[in-house]
Image: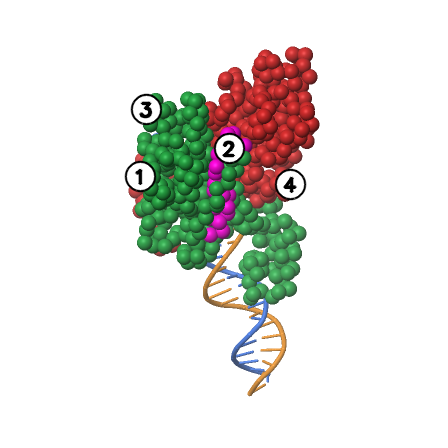
Chain colours: A green, B red, C blue, D orange
DNA sequence: ACCCAAGTTTGAAACGTTATAAATGCGATG
DNA sequence: CATCGCATTTATAACGTTTCAAACTTGGGT
């Protein structure tokens, strides 16, 4: 009758000889509706293959049943988005939430997608990464009381949900391992300036060096955000400059491979400890010492946390620091 | 007044002293509305920061403004989803479409998400991959006249939109290269049985071998879908069996690296030509001959094609075969 | 017999938009 | 002067859902 006879509350109401309102409440298990009525309605709904119209629900209630994931499509960390999305979809599985990818274009301000989500009520909650110590997005979202979980911590006073990886622990362990192997001039490939985790990496690395009484160097002029080609070029520069460190802490497999490629092309051998997120550490040759950061788990946690945040749970219980695993040889 | 004073057609209508309907039509540039009125309304709308409520539009028109991307979160091809999503978001940039990721769980039938999209009108169009010659999803979507673009071709008689990569061409070129290098027992790591492109790979590979008068082997008991560990184990089996081929065509960087790792661990050297999608061919050592498949471009094409399909364009012009580039040494 | 309360069900309105059909104003035509 | 045609504008009714307050039932107590 309407378009294409899609079942609606009305078709159910007709068949059950009830009012639309009753059907609606029955389906939401309102205790005011007689238990037998609820059962009967559910049964009819199932037999008609009913499922509620999201647009109508959304219009009426203001709830979108959407979770937005802010993805920088050019993210350089290997498989970042992929793993995260895997975890998120897992967390959202069998819930009514849909996952919407909102791109963060690198030629536009980071805050833009957040503003548009707030302005147009495009989601019930939002997840993002690349968190900075004084993150504008976090500030804006807190101001609006809008549910979110970010990957990475801030230094803001107001507590908020986050999931982070212990990059300090990783860098500390990695540098320590290098030093134990006899490396005397370890260096760190830094994360892009401004990110909170860049500080964590740097501090973990320098702390380990300090504890060992060794001068560690943080490379400058290069970061994880750069292309493999740029990293290779930079390393080649160090080589021709005769200032190649003898050991590298690489916070990503791409940077590790780029460093290794540049060194090995020039006939230099080097020690590397890398963080990897893609699970491909086992097939890189030569083998590097490595630590695995489980981004899928991070995604799953963020998905779960966000749902709890939407349900109104306070932020203190929605924070988790993934520990750095021991180094896998 | 309503909730949180979000601007709506009504607030605009009030300010402009017009009826809601007029405002609606003015904003959609209906020629029936006086040009000056249209301008005035647009101006007021902008000043109020109006943007239409998607839920209401969707409820009223049946259009969702959503494009669904069916993603198998466990896809083994490196960065598959990531690159595809990058291309898609690029194609959807500055359109009114949102990108929704619908997971295809490997423990449930592939057709399920398609059914639910059709049943619940969750999107205006859908994009998916892992196409088979007699793809149920394609059949179902064609039956319903529902817009879609798939990555990979079918063997169905009804024309439909698709984007594919010339896997025949890749495999042919790869095998030819191996043979030219003196390989006498080339083999192919196959794609999972059932996928259309598995046939293309196989045929391209075998054709090249045949043209050269050489017996090529397609490995069995293993495929691209297997984990790196499984591939390594398989290769180790071949080695201990004393039946290791001397050259490999690998349709993915993961399989290439796994093959190389297993061989090099056992002290065997081997020739490999790989297809890569992650752009990291330059940092793998030793260097493999390789061909790049641009999945981001594929995603972008699919996004554009889908919009044209939704607009009613016939499928014949919405098909594109990405050519295999020459081998990069 | 009457009323009240508890237990159920229902009517009506609203969320913001668009499509249809009808109404309005106005200059020109007969 | 009545009428037609044209260019604009508008009232109204949906789309499918939820919620509020009001309206029914009962059965029991007085």
Q: Are marks 2 and 1 in contact (CB under 8 Å)?
A: no
Reading the image, the residue beneath label 1 is: B43
Q: Is residue A248 magenta?
A: no
- Position above or below: B304 against A147: above
Q: Which chain is indicated by disc 4?
A: B
Residue at 61%, 52% (x, y): give it: A11
Mark linked to residue A241: 3
Residue at 61%, 41% (x, y): give it: B106
Q: Which chain is indicated by disc 1?
A: B
Badge 1 element: helix
The 10 Å Cα crowd at callout 3, few under 14, some 14 to 19, many 20 or more, is few
* In the foreground, A265 or A88: A265
The magenta segment: A283-305
- Please indicate whether residue A12 sits to the left or right of residue B308 in the image: right
The label nearer to you, 4 versus 2, is 2
Number of numbered discs on residues: 4
Image coordinates for residue A115, horizontal then vertical, percent: 36, 44
Mark linked to residue B109: 4
Mark pair 1, 4: CA separation: 50 Å
């Amino acid at each position: 009758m309407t378009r294409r006879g899609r079942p609606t509350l009305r078709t159910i109401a007709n068949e059950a000889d009830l009012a639309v309102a009753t059907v609606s409440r029955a389906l939401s298990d309102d205790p005011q509706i007689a238990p037998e009525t609820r059962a009967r309605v559910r049964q009819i709904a199932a037999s008609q293959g009913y499922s509620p119209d999201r647009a109508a629900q959304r219009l009426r209630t203001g709830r979108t049943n959407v979770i937005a994931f802010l993805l920088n499509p050019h993210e350089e960390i290997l498989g970042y988005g992929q793993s995260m999305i895997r975890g998120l979809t897992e967390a959202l599985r069998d819930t009514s939430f849909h996952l919407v990818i909102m791109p963060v274009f690198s030629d536009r301000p980071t805050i833009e997608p957040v503003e548009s989500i707030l302005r147009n009520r495009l989601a019930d909650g939002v997840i993002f990464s690349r968190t900075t110590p004084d993150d504008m997005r976090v500030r804006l979202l807190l101001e609006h009381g809008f549910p979110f979980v970010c990957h990475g911590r801030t230094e803001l006073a107001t507590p908020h949900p986050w999931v982070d990886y212990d990059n300090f622990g990783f860098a500390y362990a990695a540098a320590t391992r290098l030093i134990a192997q006899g490396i005397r001039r370890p260096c760190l490939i830094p994360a892009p300036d401004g990110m909170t985790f860049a500080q964590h990496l740097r501090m973990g690395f320098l702390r380990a060096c300090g504890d060992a009484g060794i001068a560690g160097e943080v490379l400058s002029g290069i970061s994880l955000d750069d292309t493999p080609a740029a990293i290779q070029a930079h390393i080649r520069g160090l080589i021709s400059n005769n200032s190649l460190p003898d050991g590298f802490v690489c916070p990503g497999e791409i940077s590790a491979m780029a460093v290794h490629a540049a060194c090995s092309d020039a006939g230099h051998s080097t020690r590397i400890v890398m963080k990897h997120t893609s699970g491909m550490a086992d097939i890189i040759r030569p083998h590097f010492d490595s630590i695995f950061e489980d981004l899928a788990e991070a995604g799953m946690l963020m998905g779960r946390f966000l749902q709890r945040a939407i349900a109104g749970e306070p932020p203190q219980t929605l924070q988790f620091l993934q520990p750095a695993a021991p180094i896998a040889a």
